Image: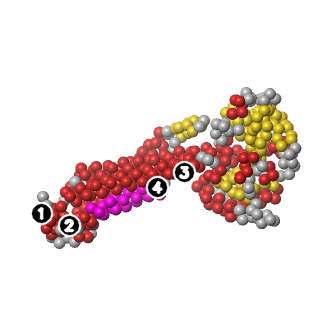
Amino acid sequence: MFNIFQLAARNLFRYKRRTLLTSTLITLGVVSVLLFISISGSFKALMIGQITDSMLGHIQIHKKGYLASIDSLPLNRNLTGKQIDKVVQILAEEDGIEAYSMRIKLGAMFSNFIETTNIRLNAVTPTDEMKTAPLLADRILEGEKEDLIKPGEILIPELIAIGMKVKVGDGIVLVANNKDGSVNGQNFTVRGILEGISGPGGRDGMIHIDDAKSLLRINTVEVSEITIRLKDIDKLPAVFTSLQEKLGSMKNQQGMPVFEVHTWEKISPFFNIAKMIDLMTFFIKIMLVAIVLVSIMNVMIMAVYERINEIGTISAIGTLPNKIMGLFVLEGFLMGILGTTVGTVISLISIAIMNATQISFDFGRQTGLLLSPTIGATDVVLVMVIVIVIAVLASLQPAWKAARMDPITALKHV
């Protein structure tokens, strides 16, 4: 076996041009895939971070049925005292949770005393909200960012600020219906202008949770949702499964589920973009497989035709067909090893250079975001294994053809 290995390695050096061209193609394929995985992964992580750390959090807990009717922001599906206590108790038992924030979500009429429009509001406790959504303050375009919000103040979306010509410091009034249908109004001072979190058409503002209780005449403890931030987003599946098992199994007196638990992926349409990035990565890997397959197969077929006399000679002196086949398979294997090793080294060096140069880009209104390409050992090993396996598989057909050659016919070949 070692002799065949030596012979295969020697043949690669005998045909240097062919080996160089094939290895270069494999190297380019490996570099393309690894760089794309690292860059797209970095962009995806930044995008997810901007979405979850600005508003959504990683996991949200609601009363069963709330999310299905969230467009109308129903107040009759809020979590109440004992339910909230149970959730808080379970959250305290989860090591993977860094922070959580309780919110009341409501719809209201917004008036600057001249014009009126509708607005969606998130009522929060500022200290909890800033721990759960640490990038939220960065979305305040005008006004004070420290402490986020105080009672009597409101952060209004940019869309409404521009449309109704409302500035920081102006007085406005909010009018809302509570659960029993009665109407209540309350005056607020505009503390800041908030970038549209849900997009350019966003109408989401923010007030203090005490103001929401006053506006809606809520005298008991109740919230619309509990938003959770994890210590490590990679632990999301494990924490979600744990919460789902503990909360999803709870039933009310009628035997119906009490809670529903959702990850940011279920709530945000941006998850589709993340899936598209994963799909693009998959197709890039398919392209790599095609490049390696065609390159190796083409080279090995040409190697068989160029070395027909050589194959006839070694066959005539008693070399078994399986050893001839092994010789060509080993050549393909070694070319795969060579191209993969060089491509991996170039990729890792390129990733290190990109991190050192600190490439920045803009995402929405977030400017100067640093691109930090990284790639896990699993991805590197997976790509290397795929390339080497495909290199071996591509060598099988030419190797099988070489092993089946008749020695006399091969020796007569000119």
Q: Could you tell me the amino acid type at mark 3?
A: Lys
Quadrant of the frame with the N terminus: bottom left
Q: Could you tell me the amino acid type at mark 1?
A: Lys
Residue under pointer 1: 412
Which callout, 1 or 2, points at the residue further toward the start of the chain?
A: 2
The vertical placement of 288 against 157, above or below, is below
Q: Could you tell me the amino acid type at mark 2?
A: Met
CA–CA distance in space, label 2 to label 4:
40 Å
Q: Nearer the viewer, mark 2 or mark 4?
A: 2
Membership of 74 in magenta stretch: no
Residue at 48%, 43% (x, y): give it: 355
CA–CA distance in space, label 3 to label 1:
58 Å
**10 Å crowding of disc 1: few (<14), some (14-19), many (20+):** few
Identify the mark at residue 362; answer none if there is no mark.
Answer: none
CA–CA distance in space, label 4 to label 3:
17 Å
Q: Position of residue 191 (x, y in %)?
A: 75, 33
Residue under pointer 2: 405
Residue 146 falls in which quadrant of the image?
Answer: top right
Residue under pointer 4: 379
Residue under pointer 3: 275
CB-based contact (under 8 Å), mark 3 and mark 1 = no
Q: Nearer the viewer, mark 4 or mark 3?
A: 3
